[in-house]
Image (tube, helix red, strand yellow):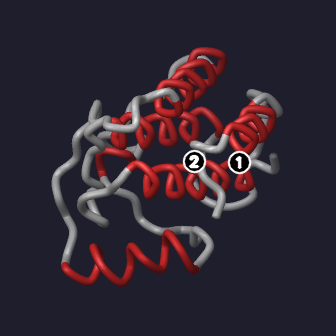
Amino acid sequence: MSTLFDRTTAETIKTRIASLSPTSQAKWGKMNVDQMMCHVTDGFLMSMGDRPLPDQSSFLDRTLIKFLVLKVIKMPKEVPTAAGLDQMREGTKPGEFEDNLRNMTDALDRMMHLPEDHPWAAHPKFGPMKRNEWGILGFKHIDHHLKQFGV
């Protein structure tokens, strides 16, 4: 299972990130490239506890759905996101492309270098999450959005 806490996997992600440009176009969805980068950054910040979101989970979300998303299925397209991670609602509003790109890579680097005992935040749908779960979900999330923009 790919995880952002594997150095080779993280370096591959960084190479793909470097392929983004201000003219990158989405293959699906409503976000532009700047909104996507802010969305992914907000996700990293949420995982580290810097962008807490209200609990919207149910027992089914915290158990079966969490297991399926982490271990079985690919990240589905067109899934509604929490308002705090949605750039059209309460998520971070995009700035200049280079700033958005730097913020995303900085957040990724920070996440990758947190100590093993860091107190990871709960996910708004999946509830409490451990380091290894955030590494897998973080990879699946950014991989999904990089594919969305063809990189």
Q: In the picture, which quadrant includes the N terminus?
A: bottom right
| Secondary element at tag 2 | loop
Residue corresponding to mark 1: 146
Residue placed furthest toward the front: 116
Vertical arrangement, residue 91 with respect to residue 77, above or below: above
Res 29 quadrant in image: bottom right
The amino acid on which the numbered mark 2 sits, given as a three-letter code, is Met
Please tell me whether residue 84 is drawn above or below residue 34 in the rendered image: below
Of marks 2 and 1, the one in the foreground? 1
Please tell me which residue lies in front, 143 or 91: 143
Could you say which quadrant of the image residue 4 lies in? top right
Give the numbered dot on residue 10.
none
Measured along the vertical axis of the image, is residue 133 above or below residue 138? below
Q: Residue at x 73, y 33 (%)?
A: 14
Secondary structure of residue under mark 1: helix
Q: Quadrant of residue 109?
A: top right
Q: Residue at x 38, y 34 (%)?
A: 45
Residue 151 or residue 108, whichever sits in front: 108
At x 74% / y 27%, what residue is drawn? 22
Q: Is residue 53 left or right of residue 28?
A: left
User: Spatial distance from mark 2 to mark 1, Cα to Cα?
Assistant: 12 Å
Closer to the chain start, of discs 2 and 1, is 2
The residue indicated by pointer 2 is 31
Q: Position of residue 112 (x, y in %)?
A: 53, 33
Residue at 30% in and 43% down? 120
**x, y (%) of residue 104?**
56, 28
* Residue 22 falls left or right of residue 31: right
* Nearer the observer, 112 or 52: 112
Q: Position of residue 126 (x, y in %)?
A: 31, 66
